[in-house]
Image: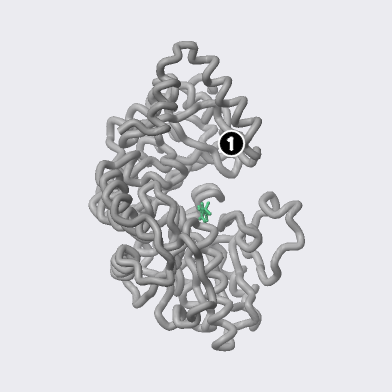
Amino acid sequence: MNNYFDELYNNINNKNNKGLIDEEIINNDKKYIIGTYGRYNIIPIKGSGIFIEDINKKQYMDFLAGIGVNNVGHCHPEIVNTLKKQGELLIHTSNLYHIYTQTKLAEKLVQLSKFNSKVFFSNSGAEANEAAIKLARKHGKNNNIGEGEIITMENSFHGRTLTTITATAKPKYQEGYEPLPKGFKYVEFNNLEALKENISNKTTAIMLEPVQGEGGINIANKEYLKGVRDLCNDKNIILIFDEVQCGIGRTGKIFAYENYNVIPDIVTLAKALGGGFPIGATIAKEEIAKSFTPGTHGTTFGGNPLGCAVAYTSLRIIENLLDNTTNMGQYFISKLNNLKDKYNFIKEVRGLGLMVGVELTFNGSDIVNKLLEKGYLINCTSDNVLRFLPPLIVEKTHIDSLINELDNIFSEIN
Ligand SMILES: *Cc1c(COP(=O)(O)O)cnc(C)c1O
């Protein structure tokens, strides 16, 4: 059973001068890794359920779950088992051949999507969105829908490729990367009138997150989303939902749009789809999917046997966690609202299922650091929104202990 990483980790555990090891790893990180992330100084080594253990054997309760990736919890035994079993059977072949687990996963996603759809698999959220944008444009071209223009929302986030940062209506992600791809237009989120005003005969598609994640947990209004759907029907515009963060059970439904009874034309998934293993999916109405034909789009790794097997397992687990997600979400939000009543620097508590944000009147990074010190992982997005994305297996006791710690930290601020 001994492998390279066992030896590496045993070495780490055997040394008792822990501070020095941390320093060595952190220094080597600075030396060898291109610094696109400002990292917290913890070195996670293993995880189980909602818990993560770092190199110094300190335990953390993970209320961020890899930014909405580990929805089934860390190292779920069924996920690990699937990785082992499929890993021994077949890890990769080319998309030039039929891939059994890919077909199985697609069939499951189509059933869950509740519309007549087909799936294209990739490896990440950005790729899933890139495929959605390409497909919408191709279909638009084939059917005289607009001139390829895509309308996206302010405060959105769609990924880090050149096209997806352009879809992401935030200058912070775009600066320095010009020239950007053409054909994107931005409109205020949750504002149907603004959308109507900006639609023209150039418009091919509208793309939005039913619940904005990076933008600060902004939840689409029911009337708004229905209105957007009606507008797209009227004007024959393609409606794309980016459910990379809000999909896969996060809001208490497999797809967030199920909360709204609104069906998109294309929906994208990634983050939690693979239970921690990288995989993305672009699900499109059959009629639209036809516009991708052999050679028009592709990927080497997308839809590989291992990724699809593990995503299939992850979906089966998630299906049984939806009730817990709804119940724990309501419980969590009510507890946070109690804190809001107590502390006037809490502006708003927002959430759907276990996608939860607490808007403060000040930047939240100090709170994140204090929680980290106490053994809780969360993050801060949009400067002043504390973001909570716990695994969907979270229990009341976990929530209670986090709330208790938050209360302590908040009381020192008051
Ligand atoms: C994270 C995220 C993406 C990008 O996914 P990657 O896997 O990082 O490329 C796209 N859209 C939304 C809504 C996301 O939250």
- Residue in view at x 50 percent, y 69 percent: 240
The residue that disc 1 covers is: 361
**Left or right: 92, with 27 as reference point:** left
Q: For disc 1, does the CB lie below 8 Å from ligand 1?
A: no
Q: Nearer the viewer, residue 256 or 52?
A: 52
Residue 338, by quadrant, is top left
- Residue in view at x 45 percent, y 42 percent: 66
Residue 113 can be seen, yes or no: no
Q: Nearer the viewer, residue 356 or 372?
A: 372
User: Where's residue 403, x and y in %?
Assistant: 38, 30
- Residue in view at x 34 percent, y 74 percent: 115
**Left or right: 46, with 360 as reference point:** left
Callout 1 crowding tier (Cα within 10 Å): few <14, some 14–19, many ≥20: few
The image shows residue 287, relative to residue 248, as above or below, that is below
User: Where's residue 311, x and y in %?
Assistant: 34, 55
- Residue in view at x 40 percent, y 80 percent: 286
Q: Please, what is the three-letter code of the amino acid marked with disc 1?
A: Thr
The image shows residue 82, relative to residue 100, as above or below, that is above
User: Where's residue 50, x and y in %?
Assistant: 34, 35
**Left or right: 55, with 78 as reference point:** right
Secondary element type, mark 1:
loop
Residue 308 can be seen, yes or no: yes
Work out which quarter of the rendered image holds the N terminus and state it: top left
